[in-house]
Amino acid sequence: MQIRLSLVALGLLAASTAVNAVTANEPIQPIRPAGELNLAQVELGKKLYFDPRLSKSGFISCNSCHNLSMGGTDNIPTSIGHGWAQGPINAPTVLNSSLNLAQFWDGRAADLKAQAGGPIANPGEMASNHTLAIEVLESIPEYVREFKLVFGADQITIDEVTQAIAEFEKTLVTPNSRFDQWLMGDADAINDQELAGYRLFKASGCVACHNGAAVGGSSFQKMGAVAPFQTDNPAEGRFAVTKKEADRFLFKVPTLRNVEMTYPYFHDGATWTLSEAVDTMGRIQLGKKFTAEENAQVVAFLRSLTGDQPNFQLPILPPSSDKTPRPQPFDK
Amino acid sequence: MQIRLSLVALGLLAASTAVNAVTANEPIQPIRPAGELNLAQVELGKKLYFDPRLSKSGFISCNSCHNLSMGGTDNIPTSIGHGWAQGPINAPTVLNSSLNLAQFWDGRAADLKAQAGGPIANPGEMASNHTLAIEVLESIPEYVREFKLVFGADQITIDEVTQAIAEFEKTLVTPNSRFDQWLMGDADAINDQELAGYRLFKASGCVACHNGAAVGGSSFQKMGAVAPFQTDNPAEGRFAVTKKEADRFLFKVPTLRNVEMTYPYFHDGATWTLSEAVDTMGRIQLGKKFTAEENAQVVAFLRSLTGDQPNFQLPILPPSSDKTPRPQPFDK
């Protein structure tokens, strides 16, 4: 019995070493579950994320365009904003966005907290402003109580609002994809086609930009490194932030996690299928034409990157009071 | 010990009798939890309810205007539809709508199933059509599998779609309000002001129309029975369905369940506070002017009608396929 236990222990040790070995040698790392978070802020942030009263119309919430039922995106080329305004760029997924080096396609927000205030006050998105948003929240007794409980202050501030939303967004990681199971040592978690796709993904150079836990999100790269990207979209990428000529048409490399759910693709949202996206990337970033078989392999690999989706109760929002500023959906 | 147990048993019996007595004598009945339902249809219907791909834009779902985070309404006077179209009438709550004698303000749909197909094909709401909606669902492999599993047929039909949505909506009852706890025999569940409000609600005649489990929803009544209702809204009510002159300006009596969450009020959505709504109803339906104290009592009673809100995991929607017809958010 003593010997048997030792053998089991040795076996476990060996398996554990094997897992670490696989993981350590791969350019893609498994997504870790969300770490230490302020759960009170998370719960408050979840409500705010779903609350359309942060918009002028009372109709648009964070979840409208970063829909957690749909891969954290809206699955349309560019988003719909106040008055049915057509957005300038494809809404990036909020899933795993805490792993990005910066937020927005051009990285103009340093982190999730800095990002969260933007859409609220953007006239083509939620079309409110921070003063009005705070006035709305301050008029809702349950929010006043909850902010006081969470932040310990009598006044609600936009800083607290964006802090809570960001804290909630940090929970939106998607571990446990089949590919991550494979990375962790389960050789059967992906099939031969998917494995061939991953090998091709590495051998062709895709991993140069799409690497790490998020399979992207860690650098800005020129869209069209080898051949120009054809688009009607006028976005200039990182140049808009730095005004450096070298940054023209550099965009944050998007995460490929859950990419089968985050169509349509690229910053212009003009590409609807993974097959076409892989073909375009090969051509304009790597100067490579994938065969139909290779393309299918890479696509199969990409589909193995879908992880555990957000898993929580639909939040119930506290009702407005008689003093709450009224939404202005049809105000010109 | 024998005697003690018997006394406890007698006590329970007495309490139980008391509960039944209270309930039986009141014109408002407690909401019962949803009864026998097809749970497979419920789960499918929940996804469809949240799926904006049933709209032309890919942006509007049932939940957009009947938001389950906000009392099953959108909390704006009239809803926002495709292209930011302004809806003609206030969106009624979906909560407890299974208890209504018919659906829509004018009762033009006999039941939830008949209602569910309407907004999908309404150009000012979701702006799709039933053929396109089915084509979209048929193109999504996970939906094809789930419909087959739930309905046992190879083809998805609009009949199945509306059946599943309706079955989900039947789960959206809100039992266990403080007022219902009082009805069930817990004398401390409502306070003196709320009880006074309920007595006034009965004595003034409000219960003539707002009665039963839904505190409304069981009849069509003339809006402005005693004095005319002032509104810019052109809706003609039940007349639009029957073309009978006697039905002009008759509307379905709305449920008052969760009424503190379903502002703004009346079919034109022009009244934002419960206090104003109670005042208007007294004046135009009962020929009664409530004092400030009475008004506050009735409002307090109405706030005790908020029950258990929907309590489920945010549904995750299956991704589209390469064959899915693409949304047309900005198509003219």
Image: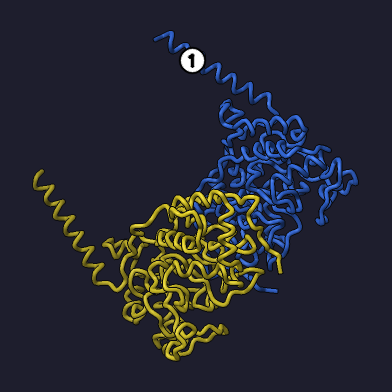
Chain colours: A blue, B yellow
Is there any visible trace of residue B213 in the rendered image?
yes
Bin the neighbour count of mark 1 within 10 Å (Cα to Cα): few under 14, some 14-19, many 20 and up: few
Q: Position of residue B51 (x, y in %)?
A: 56, 57
Q: Position of residue A223 (x, y in %)?
A: 82, 45
* B298 relative to B138, above or below: below
Q: Position of residue A237 (x, y in %)?
A: 81, 49
* B136 relative to A212, above or below: below
Give the residue at the far front of this rendering: B154
Residue for point 47% across, 64% down = B159
* Horizontal arrangement in the rendering, residue A318 relative to residue A329 (left or right): left
Q: Position of residue B143 (x, y in %)?
A: 53, 52
* Count of all numbered marks drawn on residues in the image: 1
Q: Amino acid at mark 1?
A: Ala
Q: Nearer the viewer, residue B198 or A280?
A: A280
Q: Nearer the viewer, residue A34 or A21?
A: A21
Chain for numbered disc 1: A
Secondary structure beneath label 1: helix
Q: Would you name the residue on which mark 1 appears?
A: A9
Is there any visible trace of residue A45 in the rendered image?
no
Give the residue at the far right of this rendering: A245
Q: Nearer the viewer, residue A82 or A8?
A: A8
Q: Quadrant of residue A214?
A: top right
